[in-house]
Each structure stands twice: as structure tokens, then as C-alpha cells.
Image (spheres, rainbow, N blue to C red):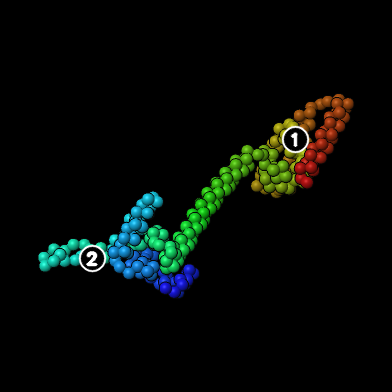
Amino acid sequence: MDSINLSKSDSSPFDQIKKIDELGTEYWLATDLLASMGYRTWKRIKDTVERAKVSAQNSGANVSDHFTNVVQMAQIGDSQAFREVLKNYKLSRYACYITAMNGDPRKPEIAEAQTYFALLTREAELGLQNQELLSNILEKLKQQNQIIEKQGEEIQLLQSQIQNLLPASKANYIPPGWDAKIWEKLPPQDKRHFRFLYRRRGFKPSYKTSGSENIETLTQKVKQQQHSELKTAIREVSPEEKERLEAAKREALKRFNEEEGGNND
């Protein structure tokens, strides 16, 4: 027999006799395979396949997954009765390998068949391992992405909860009791001053808006009320006490402005 090409080309006799079933599964017929290996009689073909079945079973393989009997109905004599007659075997790639391994390796055809199906089986095993490895990697990536997505949702929820617990930004914070439009008209130093008064004294403006008053008028009105309310809160004190209060006020405002300046940087 001519030397067998082990590459996956149509020049290999084992590639040429390979068949594909309706499910896309490859298989070989025992008569074709063993004829390529030098077997000429059905008895020798059958005996070799049966020995291969025993070897497969001893190795722990499920024989029915790899060896399928091909039968046909034959009439029994002149009667109307029929019986199944074994005509061939459908062999998987693994079955071909086991069958070849049960042949005489001294024959070149059998030795090359053993090598061919050993390589083919190994390639299939590696392909399956790679596929399983890829599936495992993809599954782990999927799980990791799910964990990352869940953590992202938890972080967003935590940030939302923290934001609800935190006070409003100092730069935009409007103390209670102030009309937003009036507050926006105040200069920055007055805003800092009234924030300080609210935090230290709980000061809230006591004004009533009127449709005829514009924002500028209301702003001045509130500032004047603040000054008179502050005087009422301080009450009448001696010049020395007033001086100490003014000094304390200036020092407090200085510290407050320094704090505000640091926070706004």
C-alpha cells in the first residue's frame, strides 16, 4: 500500500473514507477502514472489531457510543420469515483508534492507521480541553462582570445615601428662613455673615414679602432688620462690653472667613 499522508488533507485514505451523518458527526465503516488496513475477509474484519469492543469496554468507554452495528433484514430460506444480519459497523474516531491498536503493528498499513487515529484523537482531546478552558474563562468573566456590576450598583446606592445624609454644600447653602431670590442678591460677605449667625445664634430673618416690593428693596429691608434684631439680642451693655463683643465678633468673623476661604479652594 502507498504511504499514508497523516495531514488533514483529502490525500489521506482515512480522510477519503470518512463519512458524516445527518447530525454532522463523523464516522467510518469498519469494512472501509479495515480494507485500508489490509483486511480482506468479513470474518477477520468482524473479529478485529469485536476485540476492539472488548478493549474499549476494559478501558471504561461506553461501547455503544463508539460502535454501532449496521444490520439488514435477510430472508430465512424459502420461508416468509426474516432476521437481522450484521453487515457492518459504524465506528467513531475513538473506535477507529482502538480497532487499529488491536491490529498487527508490523504491517505498515496498520502502523500508519494507529498513528493517524492517535494523532486525530489527541487533536480532538486538545480541542475539547481548549473549548472547556475557554468556556470556564468566559464563565468566570461573566461572573466577574456580574460582581463588578453589582458592586457598582451598591456604590451608587451608598453614594446616594451619603448625599442624603450630608448637609448642603457650604458654597450653595441657604440658611432656613431666607427667600431664595433675596439670598441670591446678597453679596458673598453678607452670605457668609448670615450663615455664621444661623450656625452660632440660630438667626432667621423675620420679614414679609409684598408684591409691590422688588428684590433690592427686600434685601435692604432684611439687612436692616438683621441689624436691629441683633441689637435687641445683645441688649444694652456698657461701652467696655460692647467693645469686647465687637472684638469677639470681628475675631469670629475672621475665623469664619478663613474657614470659608479654605473650603472654597
Q: Quadrant of residue 180?
A: top right
**Three-letter residue code for mark 1:** Leu
**What mark, if any, has residue 233 been given in the picture?**
none
The quadrant of the rendering that contains the N terminus is bottom left
The picture places residue 18, in percent across and down from the top left corner, at 39, 68
Residue at point 49%, 69% (across, down): 7
Residue at x 34% of width, y 61% of height: 48
Q: x and y percent of residue 223 in the render?
A: 76, 40
Residue sitting nearer the eye, 247 or 150: 150
For the residue labelled by badge 1, is the local secondary structure a helix, a strand or a loop?
Answer: helix
**Residue at (70% x, 49% y) in the render:** 214
Residue 226 or residue 130, whichever sits in front = 130
Q: Nearer the viewer, residue 5 or 239?
A: 5
Q: Would you say 230 lies left or right of 247 here?
A: left
Q: Which residue is mark 1?
A: 197
**Residue 213 seen by the camera:** no
The residue at which mark 2 appears reads as 72
Q: Residue at x 32, y 64 (%)?
A: 45
Give the amino acid type for the residue marked by disc 2 in the picture: Gln
Q: Earlier in the sequence, mark 2 or mark 1?
A: 2
Q: Position of residue 86 (x, y in %)?
A: 25, 63
Q: Work out whether 71 lies above or below 174.
A: below
Decide: few, some or many residues near mark 1? Use Cα within 10 Å; few <14, some 14-19, many ≥20.
Answer: some
- Dots 2 and 1: beta carbons under 8 Å? no
Gap in Å between the C-alphas at discs 2 and 1? 105 Å
Q: Which sits in the foreground, 232 or 190?
A: 190
Residue extending furthest toward the front: 106
Q: Is residue 167 left or right of residue 98?
A: right
Q: Residue furthest left?
A: 79
